[in-house]
Amino acid sequence: MTSIPEKGVFISRSIACLFAVSILFLILSSSILFQFGDNSLVPRSIYNLILAKNIKLDETSVPIEPKSPPFVPKSCKESCFKSNPIEPATSCDRNRARLKVFMYDLPPEFHFGLLGWKGDRNRIWPNVSNLSEIPSYPGGLNLQHSIEYWLTLDLLSSIAPNVARPCTAILVRNSTQADVVFVPFFSSLSYNRHSKIHGTEKKSVDKVLQERLVGYLKGRDEWRRSGGRDHLIMAHHPNSMLLARKHLGSAMLVLADFGRYPAQIANIDKDIVAPYKHVVRRLNASDSPSFDDRPVLVYFQGAIYRKDGGMIRQKLYYLLKDEKDVHFTFGSASSYGVRKASRGMASSKFCLNIAGDTPSSNRLFDAIASHCIPVIISDDIELPFEDVLDYSKFAIFVRGSDAAKKGYLIKLLRGVRREKWNEMWGRLKQIAPHFEYEYPSRDGDAVDMIWQAVFRKVSSVNDKIHRRNRYQMSQKFLNGYKRG
């Protein structure tokens, strides 16, 4: 028989073993809860406290800037999303945000549903705290007009935990507290992917969505309250919102240019010009080829025979095609064509941005990403952020009538000395980050610059309203005195 002392030792050891196993399970379950703190039973205040302590331990670490991404693949996820985007949230005082934005909870078919995303019945938006749950935007030329995608993601991230971003614009739940009412319709993607009628359809999906959007907005108190003037609608592709624009023209529009709009619908006084998303490979400032490493003087690759204002391309082709250090050829939008343009721009001193069917094109922003001095030949062009950026410091403007003169353009560009070129090249490398779309956004990138432009536009409108109101109160007092 087992003695009493031996039984005691056995029981003591069993209890100790059971206690150790329990502690192990507690540690494992706690780590899982902390890892998924958003949806766990851990109180948010405790979770944030733990995160704050972790930040403190890593204060001395220096973030490493990722290298330039390779050529953009089929989607933008690999090159437009930061390598480690989900970080402990930066301190963002929501009360000090420049712009408070109310966003309509439109059904997914107006936005991320166009990318194939399907939320459950209770979810309108993807979880932007987790990159794997954010649908990719299609690559190729679709990317040029993907502004709607980046702005919507940025607004959602302003209320998402653990996403580090600037605090220029924040999402608010009450429209009466908002400076701007944001309409999350991916109009450019809708046009690119769904503007054609298929099968037995009587209307295209794009047209149906536009009709539904107009009806929805016209029925909202927010629209009636301001007549739509405080609404922000994205229509970056020049053919997007063709049906709806005449009904919603009082709103503030985010556009590529004003080439296909009547002045009463779109103009620089109320609307925002946003940069295209470049499609060529982005150069790092430290790896950018210098003057001597760019053997090509002038570069242009694209459609040569265009209508209307784009006739200048054909004239320039015949003027420049035989110059020895000029690359002026037809180019396609295929992946091979984009790779070729990426190499060509990076080896050229000047890149031509010539008016086509519209005053602007993505070519300007490809040149900026390539640190190739843009030569802008487009008399009616409107440029992003020109109220705060002096383009003459890093680009050359040439009137179309001058460029069409024999020998004028080539003589002008050959006359730019190395010192002046280096000065413009240096400035170009400084401002290039202002034209980058990324998620999460960062201070001074394209998303942040657009929000700042909206803020300035809203401030300008408010200034005009306040000026009109200067003497209204005096008139009310006077009317009251007369009645008394």
Image (cartoon, rainbow, N blue to C red):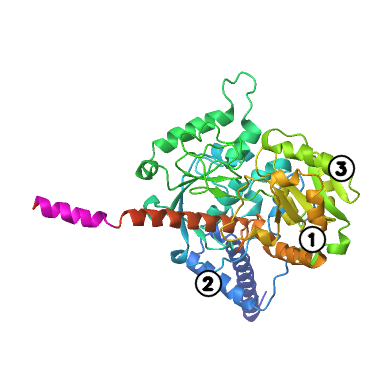
| Front residue (pair 21, 38) | 38
Label 1 Cα crowd, 10 Å radius (few <14 / some 14-19 / many 20+): few
Q: Tell me which corner region of the image, top left, top right, bottom left or bottom right, holds residue 84.
A: bottom right
Q: CA distance from mark 3 to mark 1?
A: 20 Å
Give the answer, above or below, for where 224 lies relative to 153: above
Give the label on residue 134, or none: none
What amino acid type is highlighted by mark number 2?
A: Leu
How far from the left and from the top, in percent, is residue 173?
A: 42, 52
Q: Tell me which corner region of the image, top left, top right, bottom left or bottom right, holds residue 283.
A: bottom right
Label 2 Cα crowd, 10 Å radius (few <14 / some 14-19 / many 20+): few
Task: Indicate left or right for 444 with 78 as reference.
Answer: left
Viewer-nearest of discs 3 and 2: 3
| Front residue (pair 166, 430) | 430
Does 472 appear in magenta?
Answer: yes
Which residue is painted at 47% across and 58% down in the image? 99
Viewer-nearest of discs 2 and 1: 1
Write down the residue under mark 1: 416
Label 3 Cα crowd, 10 Å radius (few <14 / some 14-19 / many 20+): few
Which residue is painted at 26% across and 54% down in the image? 472
Question: Could you tell me which secondary element the residue under label 2 belongs to?
Answer: helix
Q: Is residue 330 visible?
A: no
Which residue is painted at 56% across and 65% down in the image? 89
| Front residue (pair 402, 159) | 402
Region in magenta: 471-483
Q: CA distance from mark 3 to mark 2?
A: 65 Å
Write down the residue under mark 2: 49
Write down the residue under mark 3: 321
Question: Could you tell me which secondary element the residue under label 3 belongs to?
Answer: loop
